Amino acid sequence: MFRTIYLDHNATTPLHPAIRAKLPEWAEFWGNPSSIHWAGRGPKSLYRDSKQKIASLLGVQPLELIFTSGGSESNNLALKGLCEKPVNGRDQIVISAVEHPSLRKTAEALIGRGFRVDVIGVNRDGELDIDGLQALLSEKTFLVSVMLANNETGHLMPVNDVSRRAHAVGAWVHCDAVQALGKIPLHLPDLGADLVSLSAHKFYSLKGSGVLYARRGLNLKSLIDGGAQERGRRAGTENLLSIASFGWVCGLADEILPQALRLRELRDHMEARVLSEISGVKVNGPLGSRLPNTSSMILNGVDGETLLMNLDVRGFAVSTGAACSSGSPEPSPVLLAMGLTREEAQSSLRVSLGWGTTREEIDLFVDELKNVVHRLRGFKHGECFAYGV
């Protein structure tokens, strides 16, 4: 019987098993939450309860959260909703070189509104150039946006330090924390950011919802003209099923740290085996400042896409980088920004573990990875192997 093992949790997470049982119950709340009659009261109560649970997990007030369709919309709303036009000569937006495409492309779009975009570099381990950031900051800086956890390497950024420096020159701060939610304890006041983007489907919930945290008193222009939902900041009827699943999973706050510790142990076990049993492998990023579930590896002499496809036919789901960039012939912009060569970047593999991942699955994966790498390197050097799926 063909066995599948999912090791791509940074792309999306499977639905929490308990949510499947809750869906019929939530589906009974089919009314519009904005309706004031009996059909809307149940949905409105479910909506408010869900937002309260999410706010409690994050350590913020419910009114500071805006429901969106996910991380990409949250990033767009944060930047476009805040940066309507330069104010008092502040026309500079600063982002890191390893931001998600939904953030990077949104920032570039704001050039058309009169802003300029400056990029903070990173080193070979993906660590932010803090001195470079400090040199860019001035009274011209309007917004600084730095992600909390990189989606490809798992590297954790010093967002609190970034916030402190940016606020010192009067700039706003946005943080894309999509990849961090559910993988590490996340208390938004500790970040010091004015805006934070999050997404439900990265945390074992239904796709189609996310939140943007906007610090109280911060004014945002809605991207969508229409109704007065989300206090006029995001028009459109709410995706109640996804919101309900998001709120329910956020009630599992006590499980996040134990799972993080367990996944770090599994990941370290996997990396130790790979490094000792397969030659020519390098793990990207320092061990101590990565998400506990994420491993980005360079396997010399192996094309990443070919490796991925060979693992796929064996039942293993992994990736070479961001899911939104899959199918692109170009190497990862994140890895190139870290100073890797094109050849190294095209030999990359990302493995991201989840709450359901077991040690047995990790050992099966490493065993198969050894076989596939050996075979592909053999092909490259003219050897011949019998291939059976």
Image (cartoon, rainbow, N blue to C red):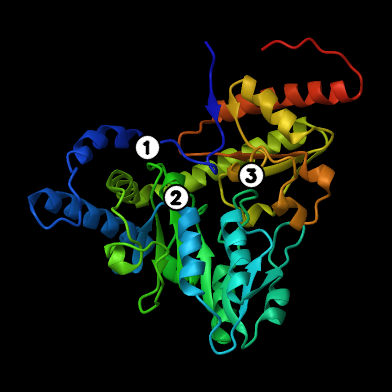
Q: Position of residue 278 (x, y in %)?
A: 78, 31
> Compared to 103, does 113 lie above or below?
below
Q: Which label's residue is closer to the chain start, 3 or 1?
A: 1
For disc 3, the marked residue is 325
For disc 1, the marked residue is 16
Residue most toward the right?
Answer: 382
What amino acid does circle 3 point to? Ser
> Which residue lies at the image location 59% right of the left edge and 42% below the top edge?
323
Q: Quadrant of the C terminus?
A: top right
Q: Position of residue 238 (x, y in %)?
A: 29, 52
Residue 336 appears in the figure: yes
Question: What's the CA distance linking mark 3 and mark 1?
Answer: 26 Å
For residue 382, which quarter of the picture? Answer: top right
For residue 289, which quarter of the picture? Answer: bottom right
What amino acid does circle 1 point to? His
Check disc 3 and report its element: helix, strand or loop: helix
How many numbered dots are placed on residues in this image?
3
Give whichever of 169, 359 is nearer the camera: 169
Where residue 40 is drawn, which disc sits there? none
Left or right of 47, for residue 88: right
Give whichever of 383, 228 is nearer the camera: 228
